[in-house]
Amino acid sequence: MESNFYEASKFDISRERKFNTSMPSRHYHNGYEIFYLVSGDISYFIEDKSYQVVGGALLIINMNEIHKLVNSSKESFERITLLFQEEFLEDMFPYNDSFHVLSSFSSGKNFMPLNGQEQSMIEKLFDKMIAEFIKQPPGYEYYLKTLLFELLIFIYRKTSTLPAAEHNGSNPINKKIFEIVDYLNQHYHETQTIQGVSGKFFISPSYFCKMFRENTGFTFTEYLNNVRIKEARQLLTGSTLKIADVAEKVGFESMTHFGRIFKDITGLSPLKYRQTNKPEMNE
């Protein structure tokens, strides 16, 4: 099967909501790639391994590893893609035999599920990188290197805690749970309960809760709230809807509950988040 080669940029980062990828199905490049799925669910193939990836997971892809993204559900997903060459860091961070921050990429541990706190930290880090990359204020390249190195340290430490890589191409997420995640990503705005969803997929509530947590790193409620808040963030910054209407649109029946969960996850109230993240308008 043919694979396409692409010359990697010295540093490139982008965040987009998409229905499909613009890259050829199988490709590789001479740079390191960090892929973060903000929301949605996709399939991702790296060499001979396949992964069912849900929002809040990181993938790291080594130089010259063949990979492709498949969006079987045809629903929208939001992703952040970071691509860089080693030379981008060389003049700032020397390496030695005892510690090489890029060794994570050759560990075979491509898939990293993140908990809620880790997601929040990583997304803030990515937001800073994207702002620096787009606006390019004085000293932006040095700050980008600092932010990237912080991310790489996190990945290095995270891989050291992950179980040994499996080489049989098995999925990190149970197929049934992936189907449930896909359902939640499409129906988050509707009333959802453990009993209702487990019954819909013919699983006992107790087994469902256990399997969901083991496979996603979240309780059912935590995952649903994360999906809803990510959609709410988009609506708060990309529309003029009233905050009460945003809360209702993403599935919250109470404004108080929406405000509390939103602040727990983002650190800001919905109003403060909207004010802080207003897109710049050209006059």
Image: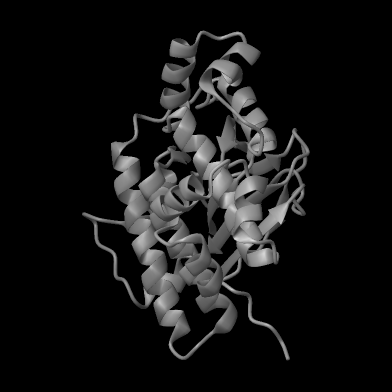
* Quadrant in which the C terminus is drawn: bottom right
Seen from the viewer's position, the closer of residues 11 and 211 is: 211
Which one is nearer the viewer's eye here, 49 or 41?
Answer: 41
The image shows residue 96, relative to residue 213, as above or below, that is: below
Q: Is residue 30 visible?
A: no
Q: Residue furthest left?
A: 98
Q: Would residue 25 appear left or right of 42 to someone viewing this image?
A: right
Q: Residue at x 61, y 8 (%)?
A: 202
Q: Please report the residue visible at 58 percent of the width from the left and 40 percent of the height from the top.
A: 253
Within the image, what quadrant is residue 71 found in? top right
Seen from the viewer's position, the closer of residues 110 and 276 is 276
For the N terminus, the image quarter is top right
Q: How is the image coloured?
A: one colour
| Residue 198 horizontal/vertical position (percent) | 57, 15
Q: Quadrant of residue 267?
A: bottom left
x%, y% of residue 114?
A: 42, 42
Q: Residue at x 68, y 83 (%)?
A: 281
Where residue 206 sits, quadrant-wise, is: top left
Instruction: Judge whether 209 appears above or below 127 on screen.
Output: above
Q: Residue 39: give x, y in percent of width and height.
A: 60, 46
**Residue 87: % across, % down:** 46, 71
